[in-house]
């Protein structure tokens, strides 16, 4: 009788441990690992040329990172350059935090989230400052992102994480000149 009780208890403990491992795997998830060169096919640049500007932003995958680089120009009503993932379901949920390992040039960048809406230049933004030539981890809770259109805040537009289908980095700090941001990976951490 005691043997059966221990066996049932052992099974319950094993199931509890297995369930915890599966839940932990579900909570912390890599969205993009730039050590995989094929990830480049899932990203694209969008620069201010769409509005007549002449900024030059490009990206490449090399040495386990995505390098987003180029020159920001304020000419011809320009002033932004960006790199973003192509639309795909990202599976974000309320309470998630995005974490990215980045190395920048000391400039201020914006992490953008995109949703399929008929509005032009619409995204949710969270701004972060890089440290020149130092790797840092940025942590962006989804509830801190602000709705914007053409860089202006759009009131009363809360983010629905389930709608997010693309993520990207934007430079629009009004400082003309060369820039470079490296990204090693982007992860999502689930709240408990």
Image (cartoon, helix red, strand yellow):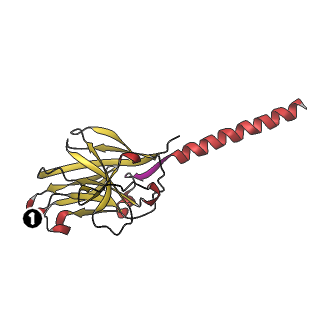
Q: Nearer the viewer, residue 96 or 27?
A: 96
Residue found at the very far front of the displayed protein = 156
Residue at x 82% of width, y 32% of height? 6
Residue 118 placement (x, y as % from top left) = 34, 69
Residue found at the very far top of the displayed protein = 2
Q: Is residue 166 within the magenta segment?
A: no
Residue at x 88% of width, y 30% of height? 2
Above-or-below relation of 156 to 1:
below
Residue 50 placement (x, y as % from top left) = 20, 68
Task: Specify the quadrant of the image occupied by residue 4.
Answer: top right
Disc 1 target residue: 76
Residue found at the very far right of the displayed protein = 1
Residue 122 placement (x, y as % from top left) = 30, 62
Q: Nearer the viewer, residue 93 or 15?
A: 93
Residue at x 76% of width, y 35% of height? 10
Q: Secondary structure at mark 1?
A: helix
| Magenta residues (range) | 28-34
Which quarter of the image is occupied by the N terminus? top right
Q: Determine whether, in the image, residue 93 is placed left or right of residue 8.
A: left
């Amino acid at each position: 009788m005691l043997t059966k009780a221990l066996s049932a208890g052992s099974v319950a403990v094993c199931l509890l441990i297995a369930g915890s491992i599966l839940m932990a795997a579900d909570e912390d998830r890599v969205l993009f690992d730039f050590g995989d060169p094929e990830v480049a096919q899932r990203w694209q640049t969008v620069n201010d040329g769409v509005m007549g500007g002449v900024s030059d932003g490009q990206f490449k995958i090399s040495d386990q990172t995505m390098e987003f680089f180029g020159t920001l120009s304020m000419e011809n009503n320009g002033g932004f350059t960006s790199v973003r993932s192509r639309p795909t379901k990202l599976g974000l949920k309320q309470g998630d935090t995005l974490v990215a390992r980045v190395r920048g040039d000391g400039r201020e960048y914006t992490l953008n989230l995109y949703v399929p809406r008929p509005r032009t230049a619409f995204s949710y933004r969270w701004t972060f400052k890089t440290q020149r030539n130092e790797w840092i981890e940025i942590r962006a809770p989804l509830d801190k992102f602000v709705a914007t259109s053409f860089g202006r805040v759009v009131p009363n537009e809360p983010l629905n994480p389930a709608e997010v289908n693309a993520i990207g980095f934007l430079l629009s700090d009004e400082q003309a000149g060369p820039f470079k941001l490296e990204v090693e990976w982007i992860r999502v951490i689930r709240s408990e």
